[in-house]
Image (cartoon, rainbow, N blue to C red):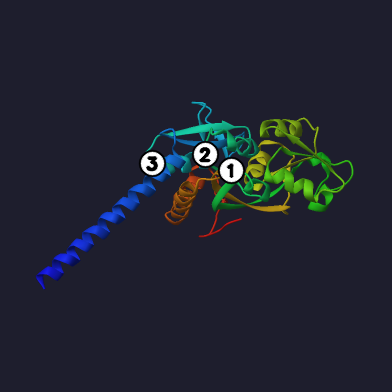
Amino acid sequence: MVMRQVIFATLGLLVSGSSAVVAQEKSAAVLRELAPTGKLRVGIAVGPSGSAMWATKDPASGQPRGTTIELGTALAKKLGVPVEFVVHASSGEVIKAADGGTWDVTFVPVDEDRKKIVDFGPNYSLGESTYLVSAASNIKTMADVDKPGVRIVGVDNTTTIRASRRITKNATVTGTKGLDEAIQLFREGKVDAVALGRDSLEDFAKQIPGSHVLKEHFWAVGTAIAVPKGKPAALAYVSEFIEQAKADGTVKRAFDANGLKNATVAPPGSRS
């Protein structure tokens, strides 16, 4: 009996030790893939208005702030490494840099083109893309947008402008490198409509007299956490992180802290 107890105890220690080794190996793999430089580099898009994806510049410090800043900071804290934010002019620019090794994780809208370049985890936000239109355009509905002579502007290489181009048959759709340029063209009356996420457009409508956001939308999109391809340990880790962040209120608090009171937290397991 004593010998049997000793054998079982020894087997228990071996199993426990083996589990600890496996856990250590997984942890090491996550750090190699997700923080190869010893810090977590988060690719972000910075523009003039915040959203679930867009960050903005703090007017006092000049540093980026927004939902992605808070989520990136929380992820780095969980990993136990410093965080660095790598700024781009748009989500399209972030994706273009995926193969360059300049960032380790990002938070961007999902579409099929991007799935060829990065691996997406779960959605953390669900949103709509629609149009901001000027009073002078007399555009009232989505059908009014797609007419000859209507000038639409969006940000190049984004899910929104790709969706707008797919459905637009008669109007013209022009792309800009960044959001600032698109909004400036709208302010100057050089375009009639801006294609963008509803959250950001509602903010711009408050700033631009006579403009309004259409109630309809032309594209429903999930915004998700993503890593460059070929990093399975990193993908598993960030996927678990974002599901936990939705469950424990981290995502909702990030939305609220940045004035996104109407932003929708994606349900558990949501993927686009």
Viewer-proximal residue among 14 and 192:
14
Q: Are marks 3 and 2 in contact (CB under 8 Å)?
A: no
Q: Above or below — where is 151 with respect to 143?
A: above
Picture quadrant of residue 16: bottom left
Q: Position of residue 85 (x, y in %)?
A: 50, 33
Q: Are marks 1 and 2 in contact (CB under 8 Å)?
A: yes
Judging by the rendered image, the residue that carries numbered circle 1 is 51
Please name which of the two marks, 3 or 1, marks the residue nearer to the observer: 3
- Tag shown at residue 66: 2
- Tag shown at residue 267: none
Picture quadrant of residue 189: top right
* Residue positioned 68% across, 46% down in the render: 159
Judging by the rendered image, the residue that carries numbered circle 3 is 77
Q: Position of residue 9 (x, y in %)?
A: 18, 64
C-alpha separation, residue under disc 3 versus residue under disc 1: 23 Å
C-alpha separation, residue under disc 1 versus residue under disc 2: 8 Å
C-alpha separation, residue under disc 3 versus residue under disc 2: 17 Å
Image quadrant holding the C terminus, namely bottom right
* Residue positioned 50% across, 45% down in the render: 231
Q: Above or below — where is 93 with respect to 234?
A: above
Please name which of the two marks, 3 or 2, marks the residue nearer to the observer: 3
Secondary structure beneath dot 1 equals loop
Q: Residue furthest left?
A: 2
Label 3 CA crowd tier, 10 Å (few <14, some 14–19, many 20+): few
Query: What type is the residue that disc 3 sits on?
Result: Lys
